[in-house]
Image (spheres, grey):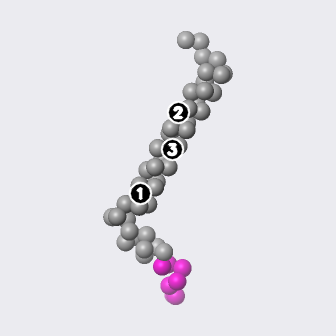
Amino acid sequence: MNWTYEHFAGFAQTWGLVYFFAIFMAVVAYAIWPKNKKSFDEASRIPLSED
């Protein structure tokens, strides 16, 4: 197959979208995972702590 710019651009746009969507879903899953709740709650109280 002779790759032209149009072929490469279409491939990059399609699979780039899939790649970034997968990364986004992984970040969302990490953020809402019940195991991480304690560390996120502690981090949310850092600005309120007085040293």
Q: In which quarter of the image is the N terminus?
A: top right
Q: Indicate the position of residue 18 as horizontal and vertical percent values.
A: 50, 38
Nearest the eye: 5 or 25: 25
| Cα distance between the residues tagged 1 and 3 | 14 Å
Q: Reading the chain from its start, which is encountered first: label 1 or label 3?
A: 3
User: From which residue to which does the magenta span run?
Assistant: 45-51
Q: Indicate the position of residue 40 as horizontal and vertical percent values.
A: 43, 70
Q: Residue at x 52, y 88 (%)?
A: 50
Q: Mark 1 points at which residue?
A: 30
**Numbered disc 3: secondary structure:** helix
Q: Residue at x 64, y 17 (%)?
A: 4
Q: Name the residue under label 3.
A: 21
Q: Would you identify the image quadrant in which residue 16 lies?
A: top right
Q: Name the residue under label 2.
A: 15
Q: Which residue is drawn at 53% across and 33% down?
A: 15
Q: Residue furthest right?
A: 5
Disc 2 to disc 3: CB gap under 8 Å: no
Residue 2's tag is none
Q: Which residue lies furthest to the bottom in this view?
A: 50
| Cα distance between the residues tagged 2 and 1 | 22 Å
Q: Would you identify the image quadrant in which residue 9 lies?
A: top right
Q: Reading the chain from its start, which is encountered first: label 2 or label 1?
A: 2
Task: Name the residue type under label 2.
Answer: Trp
Disc 2 to disc 1: CB gap under 8 Å: no
Q: Indicate the position of residue 31 as horizontal and vertical percent values.
A: 44, 60
Task: Name the residue type under label 3.
Answer: Phe
Q: Indicate the position of residue 21 as horizontal and vertical percent values.
A: 51, 44
**Numbered disc 1: secondary structure:** helix
